Amino acid sequence: MFLCYGSTMKSEHLERCQVATPHDVVSLLWALARGERKGQKFGRVIDLGAGDARFAQDGRHFHEYLGVERDESRYQGVKLPVNATILHQDALDVRGIGFDLCIGNPPYIRHHHLEPGWRNHAHNQLKEAGGPALKLTANLYVLFLAQALLLTKTTGLVVQLIPFEWVTRPSAAELRDFIRENGWGVKVYRFKADIFPTVLTTASITIIDKSRHDGEWLFGEIGRDGVIESVKTPTGNADGVLPYAARHERSHALRGLSPGGQEIFVLTEEQRLFHGLRRRRDVVPCVTTLKSVAPDATFLDTCLFEEQFIRSGRRCWLIRSDRVQLSEVLKDYLKSVGEAWKAYSTCTNRGTWWQYRGHPIPDLLVSSGFVGKGPKVLVNTAGAIAVGSVYGVIGTGAAGAGAMAARLRAYDFRRRVVHHANNLKKIEVNQLNAVLHRLVR
């Protein structure tokens, strides 16, 4: 069960997190778990973020089931087998060891949607209990997976329905290292089917066997019928995953600017006019997505920006609250925001909530997500700032921008990047830097 724990989360995040596991997928996880133990019945089972306790419904799989759920409304009125119990508690506050199995579907919540105080406390608890020192940018499901490893016995089993991205993302690197250091056996099966139509991540079944100490990692693709097709690497081919690299001194990629809430800092043309904000003085062009741009486009010039972003009513004007001197009109706009900014840790962590650190205008704009051979790459003659999921490439020079863009378009990214959601793949900014390293040699 996807369940949100952040107390300051917006309603749309709550809706995305409360997605129940399909019953056939529940059965599939149990079949795989019992297969790892030759069909034996499990002794003590724990389910972190149990929701309506659907993993407990077939009591024949275990002697004792403990579901941990913070939201009482999720299990109100649910009939449980006599050997199953639900504990109303935060899953990261559970203490003790000795569970034979941790099975379930932990919550998917990005780090900046978590309440900072709770997040920091949870990280400290995991570390003090002997777990890995995770990055503060780790998704909540990564924390739950670490907790599962701590609560199971030395010969225990962990079977979790989690995003496939955990096998490569830097934010889960410390967890992967922790597993490797202990030498546990790992199997990760990426779903071929779209089991969560409203969730934009590719689901996988991850099995971590603490009774094994061969350190073997196996990958595969799985259907809802349980048929597994083995693959050599997370990408599904022999090339392996693109490495991560630091910035190159000549040319490098920057993550899109995150000023702290696009509905505050990035306006449509209608909003700009309504608040009387002037172009260049109060706002500058920006792009938060390249989805609307045609696949064969090579430039983002002023005409295309006008057509695809301004006239289409997209958020495309970044307010210049990063400047020292602000116009009275822009000050009035910031006052009109009220307390909406308090929902964003990026704003609350700043001395002056609206004073972000600006990014330079990039030579190239690159979409982080893509379908097909590689991401969209546009020469940025419109002078737009890259925001959010759009990366910027700096340092190609005016003469080299077109040539570098052509090289990036020719590069086959799809063979070196793992699936993010369905046919969508996503490249990390430092993977893009690794490609730039090769292309500038």
Image (cartoon, rainbow, N blue to C red):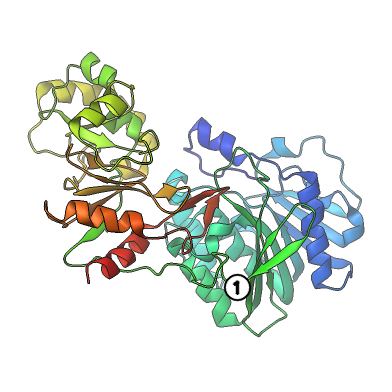
Query: Who's the residue at 47% across and 50% down the image?
Result: 372
Report if residue 97 is visible in the image.
no
The answer to whether residue 288 is above or below residue 34 is: above
The quadrant in which residue 151 appears is bottom right
Q: Residues within 10 Å of mark 1 (few under 14, many from 20)?
A: some
Image position of 128 (left or right of 2): left
Report if residue 357 is visible in the image.
yes
Choose between 357 and 409: the one closer to the eye. Answer: 409
Where does residue 155 sit, x and y in percent of width and height?
Answer: 74, 78
For this orientation, the residue located farthest to the top is 274
The residue at which mark 1 appears reads as 232
Image quarter where the C terminus lies is: bottom left
Where does residue 14 sit, x and y in percent of width and height?
Answer: 56, 36
Image position of 141 (left or right of 68): left
Query: Who's the residue at 53% across and 75% down the image?
Result: 178
Where does residue 405 sit, x and y in percent of width and height?
Answer: 26, 53
